[in-house]
Image (spheres, grey):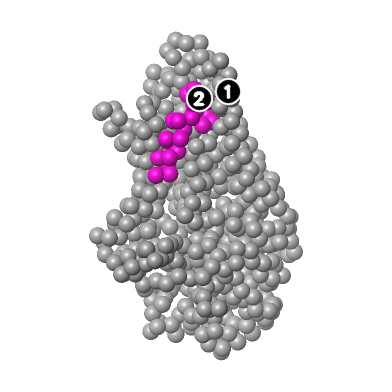
Amino acid sequence: MGLLKIDYGWALLAGLSCVFGFAPFGIFPIPVLALAVLFALWQRAGTPRIAAWLGFAFGLGLFSVGIGWIYVALHDYGDMPMLLALPATMLFAAFLALFTALAGYAQARFPVANGLRIMLVMPAAWVSVEWLRGVIFTGFPWLTLGYAHSESPLAGYAPLFGVYGVSLAAAVSAGLVVWLWQACYPKLGIKFSKPSSPALTRERRGWPLILAALLLLWGIGALLRTVGWTQLHGEPFSVALVQGNIAQNLKFNEDALVGTLETYRRLVLQNGARLTLLPETALPLLRHEVPPTLVEQLSNHARQNGGDVLIGSFERDHGGYYNSVFTLGAADEQHYRKQHLVPFGEFIPLRPLLGWFINGVLNIPMGDLARGDAMQAPLDVAGQHVAVNICYEDVFGEEIIRALPQATLLVNVSNDAWYGHSHAAAQHNQISQMRAMESGRMMLRATNTGVTSIIGADGKVLQQLPQHVEAVLLGMAQGYDGSTPYARWGNAAVLLLIALMLAGAWLRGKQVAV
């Protein structure tokens, strides 16, 4: 029992350490090693129940620290008392940890030998559960393992299989690390075969092949990073990404409204870019409430530059309220309306049951926003076909590729001021890097307090503003045509690959048993 308690502690610490693989730290080998620790612990778990608890401990460490910034939104800006905000944050982390517990339980129930389990079943179970977490209850795929590899060699798999394909490569790497450790140091690890058996002897002698497989996996990823999956569309053009740095506690304060409008008017008019982007709900008004004089000034300025400005605001239509982006300038006015809303942030699930608790007990004064259409045409501005996504929407890769191949450019407008000086904004920017690689498109990010950045079609951050300052990021952008394999296949390819891994493990296991 003492050893078991130590194992739970190791699982918790491994999950905690995994956070350092994500932005702003970006030490991408750490999540692979952390997952290797979890896989090794799963190997010696005596029952599926113990494996589930080990997975839960790992997930609790990962999510309690990795998404601790939710506390800032609830307490600092949502006015939720600390005695409610802290347990609410930990309960959400515990809920997410149930998915890693499910991965532990599922792999332990799969009827295969240890070697097949560590190499095929555990990675497949891990990524399957990551995918499930990204779709169930509208999805929360934050801290998917692949995001930690936005700048690692494994990112080369993103244009083929998306972020879950990168996760799968990282999880297989973790299995290879455990196998390599066992082959080199059998007395310190978990034996896949019985002591002194021929199988164990082969495992010990096979460490060069295991190392070669690990190097090959990462080497192929590095080579894939050099492939240009899409083609240039038109000529480069100038862009201006406006970071207003409006404090969250002032953003919707009526007394601060005039100052907010003047800040964005000044920042737009001082640049001559062909395409100017303002953050999510930069103008905290309904579209029809925006002063006509401001609309005229911004429109005339954009036309003089031969381009357009994209502005975040709210809209009302047919009795519903939308989080939207509208355009002003050389092109006719166009609109994009956010379609993937944040549960408990932009709508209350099961309002008849939970509305009283959210609005009354937790004191969160919110109503429900309406959803935009799932399929919205790209905005035709500045000579480009721009696919806009608002804030949290860029977490869902399969939704972003709906606009492809028509869209030539991706734009994300966000307001991560809700999370103060936490790691949320850096993690969000890292997610946008993955979307750029998956689609083979540049991603322009205009945010209220950061991270405001220009991301290349290869996922590399080309320019970036410091956070929490008022500034305009001036740079050049380039449109792209064509489709990556992921843009054509979506997540179906990696799910098929996972199914083949599990089927192969099962068939091989039956052959060994015979």
Earlier-in-chain disc, 1 versus 2: 2
Q: Position of residue 353 (x, y in %)?
A: 37, 63
> For the residues marked 1 and 2, what is the alpha-carbon distance in whole angstroms?
8 Å
Q: How many marks?
A: 2
Q: Residue at x 45, y 40 (%)?
A: 31
Q: Quadrant of the N terminus?
A: top left
Q: Quadrant of the C terminus?
A: top right
Magenta residues span 98-121
Q: Secondary structure at mark 2?
A: loop
Q: Residue at x 33, y 52 (%)?
A: 91
Name the residue that disc number 1 marks: 508
Q: Quadrant of residue 479?
A: bottom right
Q: Is residue 463 left or right of residue 484?
A: left
Is residue 176 placed above or below 398 in the rendered structure? Answer: above
Q: Residue at x 55, y 78 (%)?
A: 318
Judge whether residue 116 is colored magenta.
yes
* Three-letter amino acid code of the residue under disc 1: Arg
Q: Quadrant of residue 439?
A: bottom right
**In front of the other: 328 or 273:** 328
Q: Is residue 475 among what the camera can see? A: no
Disc ID at residue 112: 2
Judge whether residue 11 is colored magenta.
no
Q: Secondary structure at mark 1?
A: helix
Q: Position of residue 97 (x, y in %)?
A: 39, 45
